[in-house]
Image: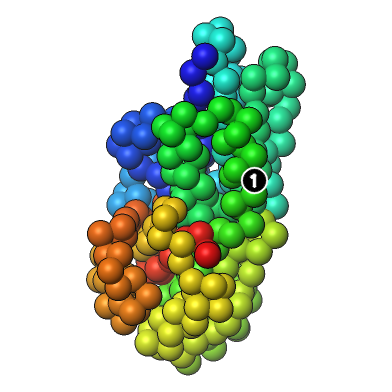
Amino acid sequence: MAIRIITDSASDIPQDVAKEWGVTVLPINVRFGDEEYLDGVTLSAEDFYHKLIETDEVPKTSQISPYVYAQEFEKADEAGDELIYFCLSSGVSGCYQSATLAAADYSDNIHIVDTKQFCISEYILVQRAVMLRDEGKSCDEIISIIQEEMKNVHVISAFDTLEYLKLGGRLSSAAAFAGNMLMIKPVITIEDGLVKVIGKARGSKKSHNMLTEFVTNSGGIDFSKPLCLAYSGFSQEVLTKYVEDSKAIYEGHEDQLQYTVVGATIGTYAGPGAIALAYFSL
């Protein structure tokens, strides 16, 4: 009996990486006006940011349907395999509800785990589950370990602009205008499955310092487990600068740094120029 691991594109796991890990990434729907795309499949991150910048349409994302989940669950059920779906936080999406609804028609070999995360913090939880699977852990053991270690997962992000939070209806126009004029960069984390603004910094250097302070206050990074860095937009330059500014916390572990691009789910609100770090704390 094999163990199948699936997740969704809110994790920002590229399809080629997913193939290497033996993981299925189900795409979330992204709509620009009347045009609908599959995140990471029919719409690359690069194309997404081109559309975000060049069009007047504010993108919308929608949850994966129960039918799509049922197709994956059916394959596992027919093969007699166990399946674990690591889902983005139920606090920000209806995907967990859709998956649970679809799973009700199948045997108890289908397991739905609410990660209470998204973006690269979901990414590293899936990667950790892959490590456990490849170590020979059982399905129940994987779920139990992940649910315990979820308590130590952290993500911290600095946005470059407030403009896309405004366009997405998460911030007033007046606040966004004032923030951009003052070079204010919001620093954001995920707490109890929801986005939480934990500070606002003037300029990149201060925002980078806040990210480093967050890591220190959380107890530091457990380098025996996955960690991931991400950037939004077309250039990794801002992220490279952050890593250089914060090299003290990665010293001796530079070979463990992995990078990905923030996709449509978070990119809709972050816009280009954001950076993020996800890790397990000690």
Q: Answer above or below: position of 126 versus 107.
A: below
Q: How many marks?
A: 1
Camera-nearest residue between 43 and 202: 202
The answer to which quarter of the image holds residue 249 is bottom left
Q: Answer above or below: position of 67 versus 228.
A: above
Judge left or right: residue 196 versus residue 2: right
Residue at 38% in and 84% down: 204
Q: Answer above or below: position of 154 versus 63.
A: below
View extreme (top): residue: 78
Q: Which residue is mark 1?
A: 147
Judge left or right: residue 100 versus residue 31: right
Q: Is residue 36 visible?
A: no
Q: Is residue 100 visible?
A: yes
The answer to which quarter of the image holds residue 153 is bottom right
Residue 273 point in image, percent of width and height: 36, 70
Residue at 25% in and 59% down: 255
Residue 211 point in image, percent of width and height: 46, 77
Residue 106 point in image, percent of width and height: 69, 15
Residue at 58% in and 28% down: 139
Camera-nearest residue between 234 and 151: 151
Residue at 40% in and 60% down: 223
- Crowding around mark 1 (Cα neighbors within 10 Å: few <14, some 14 to 19, many 20+) is some
The scheme the figure's colours follow is: rainbow
Element type at mark 1: helix
Judge left or right: residue 51 versus residue 106: left
Q: Answer above or below: position of 226 versus 94.
A: below
Amino acid bearing label 1: Gln
